[in-house]
Image (cartoon, coloured by chain):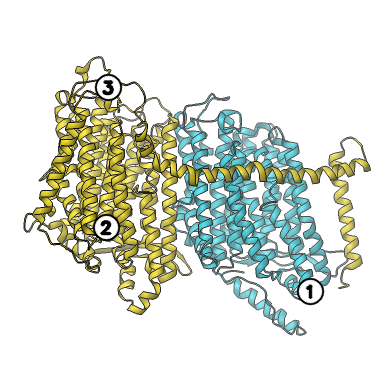
Chain colours: A cyan, B yellow
C-alpha cells in the first residue's frame, strides 16, 4: 500500500493541484508544499519499514510476446533511499520556487509532482516494462517545464533534452522487447535467465542497448550534450531536481537493470569504468573554465556522477553502500547549490559569473549557506561526501591502486572549481544587481538549511544509510532464484545472476 | 574527572552561539554589543583551557582513552569517535588552548569596530574546536576531520575581509594547496588500511600492530609502510608549509594578524610535526622516509630564511620565518628526535605568537601599514610593543637563555650526533640559524630603529595598544623568555618536557641508533649557537642599520629577491597549474565543442531528411512525434518478424 502511495500520490497531487486556485499563488504553494511534506514523510516511512512489495497487478500484454506486464512495486533498501531523495529534493524545489514563479506556480508544481511520481515509479518498479514506462515518462514533465519556464534558449534546451534522452533509450526498448519475446516474465531474474541463454554477441549487443539509455540519462561522456544546456536553461528549482534526483535514475539503472541482467564481461566493465573516470576528470576540467554558473554546476554534477558510476563498475564488495552514500551526498549538496544559484541569478539577473559577486557582504545568511553548500560538496570530513569518497577510494584501491591518484586529482579539481565558483558569487566587491539583494526568505533558508543539516547529520552517522541496506531482501531474491532454477531444470549450469553482496 | 569530550565541546558551543548571533544580526546595520561577543568568544576557549589544565595537573599520569560512539561502520571499515589524552596530546593541548585563549583575548581589541566581529570569533572558536579534535583524536580518520577542519577555518579566516577579492583568492590558494597534501593523507590511510585493516587506523592499534609483527612479517610490509609514511609526510608538507607545498603560507598573511599569529604560526601549521610525532613508531621503521623529512626540513629552512631577507612586508618576513622554523622542526623529526621537534613547536608557539601580536600592534597603530620601509623609529613611540618584539626576537635567534636558544640548540645537537653526516647537517643548519638572526635583525632595525619614514601626519598618534591587547602580548613575552627552561640541557634536572613526552615517544626514538662520530659537551653547542646568533646580529646591524631609501611602489621583492621568493610559485605554475589549465582548455574548448558539433551534425542530418519529407511549418513538434511513431512501428515490426525466432 505504502509503495502504491509513493508512486500514485504524486500523480494524484498533480491532479489536485489542477483544482487549486490559479490566482492565489500563496495558497497554491502552501497546498503543494503540504503534499510534498506528506510524500517525503511516506518515503521516510518506507525506509524505516524496510523492504516491501506489492501484489502484482496484470497491466497488459505486450504485442509479439506472451509476457504479461505487471504493475508491481518493491522496495529493497537502495531504492527506498532514492525514493526519499526524489521526494525530498522535489519538496525543496517546491519550496524554493515559491517566490519566483508567481501565477505560474500551479503549473510548475504539477510538473514537479508528475516528475516525482515518474521517478518514484522507476525506482520502485520490479517489472522491466513498467520501469521503462516511468523512465520515459520522466522526460515529458521535465521537458515541458524547461520549455515553459526556462531561460532565453529554453525551447532548444527542452527539445535537445527530450530528443536526446528518448533516442538514447530507444535501443533499450528494442532490446527489452526482443528479450521479452523470449522470456516468461519481465522481472530482473527472468530477464537474466533470458540473457543467460543468448549467444554472447547478442547478449553484448542487448547489454549495450540497455547501457546506452543509462549512459545518456546519467550522463557520461560523450553523451552529455543535452545536460549543460538543459540544467542551465531550466528554472533553478527544476535543475535541482534534475541533478539531485533524476540523474540518479541512470545510476540506478546501471545497478539494478544492467549489471544483474547481463553478465557483462570484465573487459566491458573495465571500459565503462574508465569511461566513467574520464567523465569525472572531464567534467571537473570543463567546470574549471565555465563562466555560466549553472553550466558550471552541470559539469560538476557530471564529474561527481562519473565517479559514482565508476564505483558501480569496480565490483567492490561495498559497492552498494558506497554508491548509495555518494548518491545521497551528491543529491543533497548539488540541489542545495542549484537552489542557491537560482537565488543568485535572481539577484544579478544573469547566469554569468562575471555579473555576480559580493552577495556575502550584503546578505550574510545567503553567503553562509552558499559557502557551506560549496564546502559540503568537497567531501570535507564531517560531511556525508567524505564518507562516500573515502569508501570510493577504498573501492578503487581494491580494484587498482593507481586509480586512486585519478580520483585524488578529481578531488583536487573539484576544490579548484568550487572555490572559484563560491568566490565569484559571494565574495569580492558587490556587483550591481538587477533586483535588490534582499533577504533570503525564511522558507528558502529552511529548505536549503535542512539539506545542509542532513549532510552533516549523515556525515557523522553514515551508518543510518549503510545499515538499512543490510536487510532480508537478499534472502528473498536468493529464494526466488532457487525456485526458478528448479523450474528451469533444463538448464545445465546454475544461473549466475550477478547479485551484489549487500542488497537485493 | 572531566570527560575529554568537554574540551572540544566548549569551543564548538562558542562557535555555534556566535555563528547564530552573527547570522541573526547580519542584516542589521549594527551588530550585537562587542564586549558581550568578545566575552563569549573568549569564555569558551578559556573554559577549554581550564579543562585541559585540570586534566593535566589534577589527575593521574596515565593516558586516558575515551570512545564516544561509532562514526563509520561499513563492512571492514570501522572508525570510532574516540579521544586519546596522553602526554603528547596533553602538551599540544596545553599550548593550543592556552595560546588560543591569549590570542582570542588580544583579538577583542584588534578587531574592535569590525562589522564581522561576531563572525570572526565564531571562526576562531571553530578553529580551536577543529585543532583540539586534530590533537585529541585517537585515530587517523578523526585526526583528518580536525586536519581538514583547521584548513577550512584557515580558508575562511584568510578570506575574512572578503570584499577584497585578493583576500578570497589567497584563501582559495590555501585550501587548494592544502587539499593536494590532504590527498596524500588519504592515500596514506588507504595504504595502512590495506596493510592492517581498520585497526591500523587507530594510533594504539597501529603501535600495537607494528610492535607485534615478527621480523619476517615486518620485512614483507616495509615497502607498504614506507609508502604510507611518505604520503603522510606529503600531507604534512601541505599543512606545515614545507617544500614543495609551501606557497600558500605567505599569501595567507592576507588574513587578520591574530589569525596569522594563531593559525599560521603557533598552532595549525605545526600539526604536521605533531602528526609525525604521533606516527613516530611508523616513521622509525622506514629510515629512508625519515631522511626525506630531514632533507626537506633542511632545504625549506634555508630557502625560507633567505627569502625572509628580501621581504619588505613585516608579516611576510614573519611568514617566511615561520616556514623556516617549521623546517627546523622537521629536521629534528628527520633525525628521529621527535621530542625535540615538539619542544621547538612549543617554544616557537610562544615567541612567534609574541612577534606576530607585536607586528599586529604596529600595523594597527600605523593604520594598516605593513611595509617596513614606511616604519622606523617606533621604539620611542611604542616602547612596550618594542620590548615584546625584542623578546620574541631574542628567542627566535637563540639569544642565550631565551626559549629558542634551548630548543634550537637541541635540534642542532641532535643533527650533529646523527652519524657521519651529522657535522655537515649541523653546519648547514647553523648557517640557517645565522641567517635567521640576520633577517630578524633586519626586521627589528627597520621597524623600531632609525627614524620614522611613514606618511602618517601626526606621528604622535602612534602609540602602544590598549591594555586588553597588551596583557596577552606580555604573557607571551614571558613565555618567550622562560618556556625554554622546561628542557634546558645545560641545567641538570631541567628536562621536564623530555620526561613528560618519554612515555609516548621513547620507544620510537630508541629504535634508531645512530652513533655520533664526535662527542661534544652540550656547552660547546651552546657556545657555538651563541656565537652564531651574535654573528648574525652583527651582520644585520652592519648591513641594515643605514637609511632606507623611500619608495612608493609595492612591498613585493624585486629582481633576484623576487625570483628566489616566488621560486616555488613559479615551479607550480610551470608544472601543475599550466598543465591543468591546458587540459581544462583542451577539454572545454576542443573536446566539448567537438562533441556538440557531432551532435549538431546528427540533428542537422535528421532535420534535412525530414525537411524533404514534409516542409510544413510548426514542423518540429509534429516531426518528432511522427518520427517516434514511425520508430515505434518499426520496432514492433522487427519484434514481430524476428521475435522468438532465435
Q: Residues within 10 Å of mark 2 (few under 14, many from 20)?
A: many
Q: Which residue is mark 2?
A: B333
Q: Quadrant of residue A54?
A: bottom right
Q: Chain of mark 2?
A: B
Marks 2 and 1, Cα distance to the nearest angstrom? 63 Å
- The kind of secondary structure element at disc 3 is loop
Marks 3 and 2, Cα distance to the nearest angstrom? 42 Å
Badges 3 and 2, same chain: yes
Q: Which residue is mark 3?
A: B549
Residue pictured at 35% horizontal, 32% vertical: B557
Circles 3 and 2: CB distance less than 8 Å? Answer: no
Q: Give x and y (percent) for residue A18.
A: 73, 41
Q: Give x and y (percent) for residue A288.
A: 56, 42
Q: Which mark is residue A199?
A: 1
Circles 2 and 1: CB distance less than 8 Å? Answer: no
Which of the two discs, 2 and 1, sits closer to the camera? Answer: 2
Please state if A196 lies on the left or on the right of B397 as rendered: right
Front residue (pair A441, A166): A166
Q: Quadrant of residue B570?
A: top left
Which of the two discs, 3 and 2, sits closer to the camera? Answer: 3
Q: Residues within 10 Å of mark 3 (few under 14, many from 20)?
A: few
Badges 1 and 3, same chain: no
Residue pictured at 75% horizontal, 37% vertical: A155
Please state if A51 lies on the left or on the right of B204 as rendered: right
Mark sitting earlier along the chain (3/2): 2
Amino acid at each position: 500500500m505504502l509503495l502504491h502511495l509513493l508512486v500514485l500520490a504524486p500523480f494524484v497531487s498533480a491532479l489536485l493541484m489542477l483544482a487549486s486556485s490559479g490566482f492565489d499563488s500563496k495558497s497554491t504553494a502552501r497546498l503543494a508544499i503540504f503534499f510534498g511534506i506528506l510524500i517525503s514523510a511516506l518515503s521516510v516511512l518506507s525506509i524505516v519499514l524496510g523492504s516491501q512489495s506489492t501484489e502484482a497487478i496484470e497491466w497488459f500484454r505486450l504485442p509479439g510476446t506472451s509476457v504479461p506486464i505487471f504493475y508491481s512495486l518493491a522496495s529493497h533498501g537502495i531504492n527506498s533511499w532514492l525514493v526519499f531523495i526524489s521526494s525530498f529534493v522535489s519538496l525543496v524545489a517546491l519550496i524554493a520556487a515559491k517566490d519566483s514563479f508567481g501565477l505560474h506556480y500551479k503549473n510548475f508544481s504539477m510538473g514537479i509532482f508528475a516528475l516525482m511520481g515518474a521517478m518514484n515509479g522507476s525506482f520502485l518498479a520490479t517489472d522491466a516494462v513498467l520501469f521503462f514506462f516511468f523512465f520515459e515518462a520522466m522526460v515529458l514533465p521535465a521537458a515541458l517545464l524547461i520549455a515553459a519556464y526556462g531561460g532565453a534558449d529554453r525551447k532548444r534546451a527542452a527539445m535537445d533534452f527530450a530528443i536526446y534522452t528518448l533516442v538514447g533509450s530507444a535501443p533499450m526498448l528494442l532490446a527489452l522487447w526482443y528479450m521479452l519475446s523470449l522470456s516468461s516474465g519481465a522481472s530482473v531474474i527472468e530477464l537474466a535467465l533470458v540473457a543467460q541463454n543468448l549467444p554472447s554477441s547478442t547478449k553484448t549487443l542487448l547489454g549495450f542497448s540497455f547501457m546506452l539509455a543509462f549512459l545518456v540519462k546519467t550522463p557520461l561522456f560523450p553523451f552529455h550534450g543535452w545536460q549543460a544546456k538543459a540544467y542551465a536553461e531550466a528554472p533553478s528549482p527544476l535543475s535541482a531536481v534534475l541533478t539531485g534526483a533524476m540523474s540518479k535514475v541512470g545510476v540506478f539503472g546501471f545497478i539494478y537493470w544492467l549489471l544483474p541482467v547481463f553478465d557483462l564481461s570484465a573487459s566491458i566493465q573495465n571500459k565503462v569504468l574508465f569511461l566513467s573516470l574520464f567523465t569525472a576528470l572531464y567534467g571537473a576540467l570543463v567546470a574549471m573554465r565555465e563562466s555560466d554558473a549553472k553550466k558550471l554546476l552541470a559539469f560538476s554534477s557530471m564529474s561527481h556522477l562519473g565517479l559514482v558510476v565508476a564505483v558501480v563498475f569496480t565490483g567492490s564488495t561495498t559497492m552498494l553502500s558506497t554508491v548509495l552514500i555518494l548518491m545521497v551526498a551528491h543529491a543533497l549538496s548539488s540541489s542545495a547549490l542549484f537552489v542557491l544559484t537560482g537565488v543568485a541569478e535572481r539577484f544579478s539577473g544573469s547566469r554569468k559569473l562575471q555579473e555576480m559577486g559580493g552577495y556575502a557582504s550584503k546578505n550574510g545568511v545567503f553567503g553562509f549557506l552558499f559557502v557551506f553548500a560549496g564546502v559540503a560538496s568537497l567531501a570535507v570530513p564531517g560531511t556525508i561526501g567524505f564518507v562516500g569518497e573515502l569508501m570510493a577510494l577504498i573501492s578503487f584501491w581494491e580494484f587498482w591502486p593507481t586509480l586512486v591518484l585519478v580520483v585524488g586529482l578529481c578531488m583536487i579539481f573539484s576544490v579548484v572549481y568550487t572555490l572559484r565558483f563560491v568566490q565569484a558569487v559571494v565574495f569580492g566587491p558587490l556587483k550591481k544587481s538587477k533586483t535588490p539583494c534582499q533577504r533570503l526568505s525564511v522558507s528558502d533558508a529552511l529548505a536549503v538549511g535542512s539539506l545542509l543539516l542532513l549532510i552533516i547529520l549523515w556525515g557523522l552517522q553514515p551508518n543510518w544509510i549503510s545499515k538499512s541496506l543490510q536487510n532480508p531482501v537478499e534472502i528473498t531474491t536468493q529464494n526466488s532464484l532457487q525456485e526458478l532454477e528448479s523450474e528451469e531444470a533444463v538448464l545445465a549450469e546454475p544461473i549466475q545472476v550477478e547479485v551484489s553482496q549487500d542488497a537485493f | 574527572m572531566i570527560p575529554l569530550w568537554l574540551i572540544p565541546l566548549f569551543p564548538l558551543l562558542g562557535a555555534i552561539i556566535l555563528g547564530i548571533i552573527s547570522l541573526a544580526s547580519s542584516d542589521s546595520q549594527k551588530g550585537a554589543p562587542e564586549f558581550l561577543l568578545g566575552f563569549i568568544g573568549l569564555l569558551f576557549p578559556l573554559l577549554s583551557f581550564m579543562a585541559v589544565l585540570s586534566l593535566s595537573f589534577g589527575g593521574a599520569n596515565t593516558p586516558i582513552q575515551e570512545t564516544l560512539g561509532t562514526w563509520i561502520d561499513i563492512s571492514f571499515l570501522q572508525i570510532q569517535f574516540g579521544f586519546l589524552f596522553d602526554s603528547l596530546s596533553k602538551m599540544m593541548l596545553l599550548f593550543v588552548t592556552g595560546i588560543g585563549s591569549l590570542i582570542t583575548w588580544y583579538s577583542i581589541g584588534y578587531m574592535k569596530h569590525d562589522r564581522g566581529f561576531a563572525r570572526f570569533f565564531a571562526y576562531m572558536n571553530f578553529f580551536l574546536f577543529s585543532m583540539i579534535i586534530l590533537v585529541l583524536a585517537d585515530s587517523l580518520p578523526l585526526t583528518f576531520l580536525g586536519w581538514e577542519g583547521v584548513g577550512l577555518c584557515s580558508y575562511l579566516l584568510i578570506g575574512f575581509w572578503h570584499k577584497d577579492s585578493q583576500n578570497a583568492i589567497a584563501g582559495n590558494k590555501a585550501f587548494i594547496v592544502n587539499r593536494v597534501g590532504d590527498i596524500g593523507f588519504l592515500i596514506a590511510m588507504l595504504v595502512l588500511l590495506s596493510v592492517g585493516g581498520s585497526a591500523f587506523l587507530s594510533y594504539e592499534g597501529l603501535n600495537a600492530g607494528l610492535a607485534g609483527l615478527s621480523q619476517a612479517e615486518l620485512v614483507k610490509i616495509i615497502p607498504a609502510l614506507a609508502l604510507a609514511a611518505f604520503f603522510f609526510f606529503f600531507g604534512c608538507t601541505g599543512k606545515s608549509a614545507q617544500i614543495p607545498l609551501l606557497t600558500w603560507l605567505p599569501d595567507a598573511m592576507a588574513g587578520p594578524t591574530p589569525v596569522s599569529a594563531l593559525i599560521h604560526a603557533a598552532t595549525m601549521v605545526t600539526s604536521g610535526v605533531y602528526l609525525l610525532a604521533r606516527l613516530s613508531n611508523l616513521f622509525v621503521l622506514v629510515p629512508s622516509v625519515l631522511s626525506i623529512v630531514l632533507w626537506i626540513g633542511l632545504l625549506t629552512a634555508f630557502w625560507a630564511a633567505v627569502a625572509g631577507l628580501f621581504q619588505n612586508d613585516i608579516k611576510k618576513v614573519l611568514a617566511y620565518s615561520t616556514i623556516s622554523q617549521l623546517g627546523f622542526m622537521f629536521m629534528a623529526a628527520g633525525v628521529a628526535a621527535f621530542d625535540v621537534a615538539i619542544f621547538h613547536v612549543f617554544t616557537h608557539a610562544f615567541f612567534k605568537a609574541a612577534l606576530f601580536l607585536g607586528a599586529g600592534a604596529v600595523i594597527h597603530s600605523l593604520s594598516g601599514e605593513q611595509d617596513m620601509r614606511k616604519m622606523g623609529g617606533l621604539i620611542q613611540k611604542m616602547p612596550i610593543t618594542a620590548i615584546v618584539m625584542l623578546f620574541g626576537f631574542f628567542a627566535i635567534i637563540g639569544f642565550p637563555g631565551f626559549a629558542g636558544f634551548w630548543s634550537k640548540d637541541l635540534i642542532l645537537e641532535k643533527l650533529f650526533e646523527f652519524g657521519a653526516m651529522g657535522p655537515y647537517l649541523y653546519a648547514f643548519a647553523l648557517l640557517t640559524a645565522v641567517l635567521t638572526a640576520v633577517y630578524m635583525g633586519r626586521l627589528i632595525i627597520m621597524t623600531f630603529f632609525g627614524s620614522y619614514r611613514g606618511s602618517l601626519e601626526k606621528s604622535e598618534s602612534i602609540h602602544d595598544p590598549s591594555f586588553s591587547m597588551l596583557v596577552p602580548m606580555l604573557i607571551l613575552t614571558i613565555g618567550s623568555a622562560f618556556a625554554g627552561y622546561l628542557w634546558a640541557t645545560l641545567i641538570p634536572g631541567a628536562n621536564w618536557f623530555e620526561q613528560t613526552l618519554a612515555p609516548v615517544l621513547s620507544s620510537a626514538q630508541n629504535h634508531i641508533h645512530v652513533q655520533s662520530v664526535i662527542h661534544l659537551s652540550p656547552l660547546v653547542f651552546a657556545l657555538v649557537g651563541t656565537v652564531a646568533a651574535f654573528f648574525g646580529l652583527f651582520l644585520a646591524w652592519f648591513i641594515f642599520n643605514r637609511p632606507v631609501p623611500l619608495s612608493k611602489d609595492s612591498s613585493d621583492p624585486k629582481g633576484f629577491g623576487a625570483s628566489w621568493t616566488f621560486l616555488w610559485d613559479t615551479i607550480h605554475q610551470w608544472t601543475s597549474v599550466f598543465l591543468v589549465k591546458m587540459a581544462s582548455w583542451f577539454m572545454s574548448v576542443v573536446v566539448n565543442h567537438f562533441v556538440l558539433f557531432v551532435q549538431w551534425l546528427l540533428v542537422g542530418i535528421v532535420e534535412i531528411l525530414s525537411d524533404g519529407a514534409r516542409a510544413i511549418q510548426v514542423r518540429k513538434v509534429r516531426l518528432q512525434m511522427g518520427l517516434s511513431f514511425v520508430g515505434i512501428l518499426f520496432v514492433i515490426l522487427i519484434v514481430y518478424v524476428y521475435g522468438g525466432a532465435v
